Amino acid sequence: MENRKVRILIQTLSRVPGEGGMDWDSPLCRREETKAEGEYYERAGACYCLYEEQPEGWEKPCKVLLKWKDALLERQIRGEAVSRMVFEPGKYHSNFYRTSFGNLLLETDTHRLQIEEEQDAVSLKLEYVLRQDGQAVSENRVEIRILGVL
Protein backbone atom coordinates (compact mmCIF):
# COMPACT_ATOMS: atom_id res chain seq x y z
CA MET A 1 0.00 0.00 0.00
CA GLU A 2 1.29 3.44 -0.87
CA ASN A 3 2.10 6.20 1.60
CA ARG A 4 -0.57 8.86 2.03
CA LYS A 5 -0.10 12.45 3.11
CA VAL A 6 -2.01 13.20 6.31
CA ARG A 7 -2.51 15.90 8.92
CA ILE A 8 -1.86 15.00 12.54
CA LEU A 9 -3.50 16.77 15.50
CA ILE A 10 -2.29 15.85 18.99
CA GLN A 11 -3.90 17.08 22.20
CA THR A 12 -2.13 16.24 25.46
CA LEU A 13 -3.23 16.80 29.04
CA SER A 14 -0.75 16.11 31.86
CA ARG A 15 -1.05 16.39 35.60
CA VAL A 16 1.13 15.59 38.58
CA PRO A 17 -0.09 12.49 40.45
CA GLY A 18 -1.55 13.06 43.90
CA GLU A 19 -2.29 16.78 43.45
CA GLY A 20 -5.30 16.69 45.75
CA GLY A 21 -7.70 15.04 43.32
CA MET A 22 -7.09 17.56 40.52
CA ASP A 23 -9.47 16.75 37.68
CA TRP A 24 -8.67 16.97 33.99
CA ASP A 25 -10.54 20.29 33.64
CA SER A 26 -8.34 22.00 36.23
CA PRO A 27 -6.33 25.01 35.01
CA LEU A 28 -3.35 23.37 36.76
CA CYS A 29 -3.28 20.60 34.15
CA ARG A 30 -0.66 21.16 31.46
CA ARG A 31 -2.20 21.35 28.00
CA GLU A 32 -0.35 20.99 24.74
CA GLU A 33 -1.55 20.94 21.18
CA THR A 34 0.61 19.89 18.26
CA LYS A 35 -0.19 20.02 14.55
CA ALA A 36 1.92 18.39 11.88
CA GLU A 37 1.85 16.96 8.40
CA GLY A 38 3.13 13.49 7.79
CA GLU A 39 2.69 10.16 6.07
CA TYR A 40 0.41 7.23 6.83
CA TYR A 41 0.89 3.69 5.61
CA GLU A 42 0.05 0.08 6.43
CA ARG A 43 2.46 -2.88 6.41
CA ALA A 44 2.01 -6.48 7.57
CA GLY A 45 -1.23 -5.75 9.42
CA ALA A 46 0.14 -2.75 11.33
CA CYS A 47 -0.57 0.97 10.75
CA TYR A 48 2.17 3.61 10.77
CA CYS A 49 2.26 7.39 10.90
CA LEU A 50 5.53 9.29 10.42
CA TYR A 51 5.89 13.03 11.08
CA GLU A 52 8.21 15.72 12.45
CA GLU A 53 7.68 17.52 15.74
CA GLN A 54 9.48 20.50 17.29
CA PRO A 55 9.80 19.79 21.04
CA GLU A 56 10.06 22.78 23.34
CA GLY A 57 13.71 23.65 24.02
CA TRP A 58 15.13 21.58 21.15
CA GLU A 59 17.09 23.28 18.39
CA LYS A 60 16.03 20.86 15.66
CA PRO A 61 12.81 18.97 15.05
CA CYS A 62 12.64 15.26 15.77
CA LYS A 63 11.14 12.45 13.73
CA VAL A 64 8.24 10.63 15.32
CA LEU A 65 6.97 7.22 14.24
CA LEU A 66 3.66 5.89 15.54
CA LYS A 67 2.91 2.21 15.02
CA TRP A 68 -0.26 0.50 16.14
CA LYS A 69 -1.78 -2.92 15.78
CA ASP A 70 -4.63 -4.41 17.80
CA ALA A 71 -4.35 -3.03 21.37
CA LEU A 72 -0.73 -1.90 21.20
CA LEU A 73 0.68 1.53 20.29
CA GLU A 74 4.38 2.31 19.95
CA ARG A 75 5.88 5.81 19.72
CA GLN A 76 9.50 6.22 18.60
CA ILE A 77 11.37 9.53 18.62
CA ARG A 78 14.64 10.22 16.81
CA GLY A 79 16.43 13.55 17.18
CA GLU A 80 18.40 15.26 19.95
CA ALA A 81 16.98 12.53 22.18
CA VAL A 82 15.96 8.99 21.30
CA SER A 83 13.09 7.15 22.90
CA ARG A 84 10.65 4.34 22.39
CA MET A 85 7.43 4.21 24.39
CA VAL A 86 5.05 1.26 24.27
CA PHE A 87 1.43 1.59 25.34
CA GLU A 88 -0.58 -1.55 26.04
CA PRO A 89 -3.53 -1.48 28.44
CA GLY A 90 -2.93 -3.30 31.71
CA LYS A 91 0.81 -3.68 31.15
CA TYR A 92 3.97 -1.85 32.19
CA HIS A 93 6.63 -1.23 29.54
CA SER A 94 10.14 0.02 30.42
CA ASN A 95 12.34 1.85 27.93
CA PHE A 96 15.30 4.19 28.01
CA TYR A 97 14.97 7.84 27.07
CA ARG A 98 18.41 8.59 25.64
CA THR A 99 19.71 12.16 25.83
CA SER A 100 23.14 13.74 25.45
CA PHE A 101 23.20 13.95 29.27
CA GLY A 102 22.58 10.24 29.80
CA ASN A 103 19.83 7.65 29.83
CA LEU A 104 16.63 7.78 31.87
CA LEU A 105 14.69 4.59 32.50
CA LEU A 106 11.00 5.39 32.06
CA GLU A 107 7.97 3.13 32.41
CA THR A 108 4.55 3.48 30.88
CA ASP A 109 1.53 2.12 32.75
CA THR A 110 -1.31 2.27 30.24
CA HIS A 111 -4.87 2.38 31.53
CA ARG A 112 -6.70 2.94 28.24
CA LEU A 113 -5.97 2.75 24.52
CA GLN A 114 -8.85 3.29 22.15
CA ILE A 115 -8.36 3.14 18.38
CA GLU A 116 -11.21 4.37 16.20
CA GLU A 117 -11.12 4.20 12.42
CA GLU A 118 -13.46 6.58 10.66
CA GLN A 119 -14.15 7.19 6.99
CA ASP A 120 -11.08 9.36 6.36
CA ALA A 121 -9.45 9.55 9.80
CA VAL A 122 -8.00 7.54 12.66
CA SER A 123 -8.34 8.55 16.30
CA LEU A 124 -6.01 7.20 18.99
CA LYS A 125 -7.06 7.92 22.59
CA LEU A 126 -4.67 7.07 25.36
CA GLU A 127 -4.48 7.36 29.15
CA TYR A 128 -1.28 6.39 30.93
CA VAL A 129 0.98 7.05 33.90
CA LEU A 130 4.66 7.80 33.27
CA ARG A 131 6.98 6.43 35.96
CA GLN A 132 10.66 6.94 36.70
CA ASP A 133 12.40 4.67 39.21
CA GLY A 134 8.99 3.22 40.09
CA GLN A 135 7.53 6.62 41.05
CA ALA A 136 4.66 8.16 39.10
CA VAL A 137 5.85 11.47 37.61
CA SER A 138 2.84 12.32 35.44
CA GLU A 139 -0.64 11.18 34.51
CA ASN A 140 -1.45 11.75 30.85
CA ARG A 141 -4.35 11.84 28.44
CA VAL A 142 -3.52 12.01 24.75
CA GLU A 143 -5.73 12.17 21.69
CA ILE A 144 -4.09 11.79 18.29
CA ARG A 145 -6.20 12.45 15.20
CA ILE A 146 -4.80 11.48 11.84
CA LEU A 147 -6.80 13.15 9.07
CA GLY A 148 -6.80 12.33 5.39
CA VAL A 149 -6.61 8.56 5.75
CA LEU A 150 -8.73 6.98 3.02
Image (cartoon, helix red, strand yellow):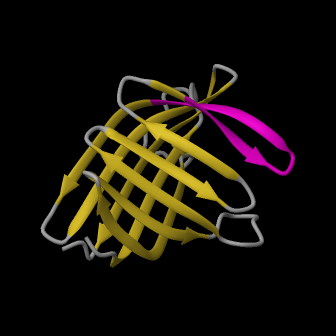
Left or right position of 56 against 88: right
How many numbered discs sit on the rendered protein?
Answer: 0
Q: Which quarter shows the C terminus? A: bottom left
Q: In this view, which residue lies farthest toward the left?
A: 119
Q: Residue at x 68, y 51 (%)?
A: 82
Main SS of residues in magenta: strand
Q: Which residues are magenta?
A: 94-109
The x and y percentages for residue 141 are: 43, 44
Left or right position of 30 against 44: right
Question: Which image quarter: residue 71?
Answer: top left
Q: Residue at x 27, y 57 (%)?
A: 123
Left or right position of 116 against 22: left
Q: Residue at x 75, y 60 (%)?
A: 80
The x and y percentages for residue 8 are: 40, 70
Q: Is residue 40 above or below residue 45?
A: below
Q: Is residue 99 above or below residue 149?
A: above
Q: Is 4 included in the stretch rendered in magenta?
A: no
Q: Is residue 12 above or below residue 90?
A: below
The x and y percentages for residue 74 are: 45, 46
The x and y percentages for residue 99 are: 78, 49
Q: Residue at x 74, y 36 (%)?
A: 104
Question: Which image quarter: residue 63?
Answer: bottom right
Q: In this view, which residue lies farthest toward the top?
A: 134
Question: Which image quarter: residue 114?
Answer: top left
Q: Which quarter shows the N terminus? A: bottom left
